[in-house]
Image: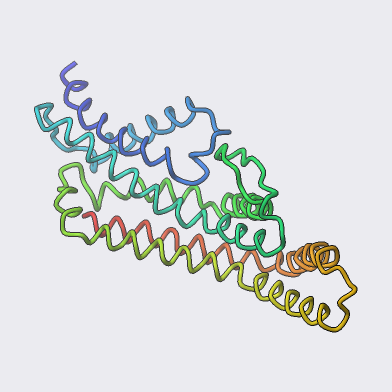
Amino acid sequence: MELILQLLPPFLLIFCRITSFFVVTPIFSARTIPTHYKIGLSAFLSFIIVASEVGEQTVVIDALYALSIMKEIVIGLLLGFIAYMFFTVVQTAGSFIDLQMGLGMANIIDPMTGAQAPLLGNLKFFIATLLFLALNGHHYLIAAILDSYEWVPLSSDLFAKLYDGSVNEFLVTSFSQAFALAFQMAAPFVAAMFLVDVGLGILTKVAPQFNVFVIGIPLKILIGFMMLMLLIPGFYNLFSELFDRMIKAVQQLTGLLQ
């Protein structure tokens, strides 16, 4: 009983951080994964950390314990949010592509999040998910949250780090990088659709009897799918670089919070 009372406070803090991390992190936050599986995995990882040397820290349940719980939840949410931000680059790029191809209104329900998602963005999101699992990206995420206790222990002063503004600056920089990556992924499609619009504009001037709206929409969709077929073989290298940047961003955030 004495050992249980000694290990229970740090276990609850560790459990709060890992659970909040799995709430927003890619793959693990999907609605298709049962909730009891997420809770069980979080509890199992918490037992591992408590049993290790990292978890051997004295934690006393006092008036500041509730503040420590909030701190651990914020740390887990920040780490998971950075990973999820880079993962949603694929859907953002898909939104740009659908808007240029004329499929902006053809949104579908994403079973991973339960929200509406662009058509091609959802396709690329599924491809990215399969490649992420094939590259053992979920193992790297679990390793990142486990290693975070070596850099950001339970006794860390998170709110002082948030007050100096370095974390906020890193979040803004990461968001701008994610948006730039999304635009770079959609750039070939945007350039191709722009050339199609220029060609249709020239056709309108040369032969006004042609109905551009009837010809243009199917033509842009056809060229868009042809571009997609040409670029699919390069998705492996593209998504590998994206996942590498995501893991590095999580590690950089962990270094800022230490």
Residue 35: image location, x then y, percent = 48, 27
Residue 197: image location, x then y, percent = 73, 74
Q: How many discs appear?
A: 0
The one of 246 and 223 positioned closer to us in this rendering: 223
Task: Answer left or right for 43 relative to 230.
Answer: left
Residue at the spot 28% in from the left edge and 63% down from the top edge = 169
Identify whether 182 is placed above or below 74: below
Residue at the spot 58% in from the left edge and 61% down from the top edge = 93
Location of the N terminus by quadrant is: top left
Task: Answer left or right for 176 relative to 194.
Answer: left
Rendering quarter of residue 73: top left
Task: Answer left or right for 201 relative to 25.
Answer: right
Residue at the spot 19% in from the left edge and 37% down from the top edge = 56
Give the residue furthest to the left.
63
The one of 59 and 171 positioned closer to us in this rendering: 171
Specify how the rendered protein is coloured: rainbow
Residue at the spot 38% in from the left edge and 62% down from the top edge = 174
Identify whether 68 is placed above or below 75: above
Location of the C terminus by quadrant is: bottom left
Residue 185: image location, x then y, percent = 59, 68
The one of 148 and 1 positioned closer to us in this rendering: 148
Rendering quarter of residue 22: top left
Give the residue furthest to the top.
1
Task: Answer left or right for 141 relative to 61.
Answer: right
Give the residue furthest to the front.
208
Identify whether 156 is placed above or below 45: below
Identify whether 194 is placed above or below 139: below
Residue 212: image location, x then y, percent = 82, 69
